[in-house]
Image (cartoon, grey):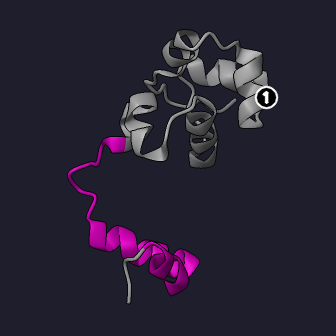
Amino acid sequence: MSQRRASSNNVRTLREEILLSKAELARRAGISPLTVDRIEGGAECRLDTKRKIILALGKKLEQKEEVFPDLGQRTDDEDPETTDANAARRFGDGALKKLGKKE
C-alpha cells in the first residue's frame, strides 16, 4: 500500500464554520464524502480536487491559502523560469499564453 504524506489544511475548520456536513461539501465539490474525510485527515490530493473544495467552501481561488496553506509555499530550489519551461514543454506554449506568461 502506498503512503501519502500528511498535509496540513483548514478544510474541516472552514466547513464547520459554515455548518456544512462532509456529505454536503462532497456534493458541492463533486467528490466523494470519503475523499473529503481523507483530505480533512491530512491526506494529499490532486490540485483539481483542491480547487473544487476551495470553490465549494465559498472561497475564491485567490483565497486558496486560507484552505490549503501549502499552496502558497514555494521551495527555495523552485525557479519560476524552470517551472514555466516545464509547463511549456508539458502543455505547450498555449498554456502559458493563457496565463499571460508569453506573448
Magenta run includes residue 84: yes
Position of residue 75 in the picture relative to residue 35 (left or right) = left
Position of residue 26 in the picture relative to residue 97 (left or right) = right
Determine the residue located farthest toward the bottom in the rendered image: 103
The structure residue drawn at horizontal position 55% and vertical position 36%, both measured from the top left corner, is 54
Count the numbered circles shown.
Answer: 1
Q: Check the image and report above or below for 64 versus 97.
A: above
Position of residue 79 in the picture relative to residue 34 (left or right) = left
Q: Which residue is mark 1?
A: 27
Q: Which of the 4 quarters of the picture holds residue 2?
A: top right
The structure residue drawn at horizontal position 20% and vertical position 51%, both measured from the top left corner, is 76
Q: Amino acid at mark 1?
A: Arg
The structure residue drawn at horizontal position 23% and vertical position 56%, both measured from the top left corner, is 77
Residue 41 in percent (x, y) is at: 57, 16
Which of the two residues, 97 or 38, is positioned nearer the viewer here? Answer: 97
Residue 42 in percent (x, y) is at: 53, 21
**Magenta span:** 72-99
Determine the residue located farthest toward the left in the rendered image: 76
Which quadrant of the figure contains the N terminus? Answer: top right
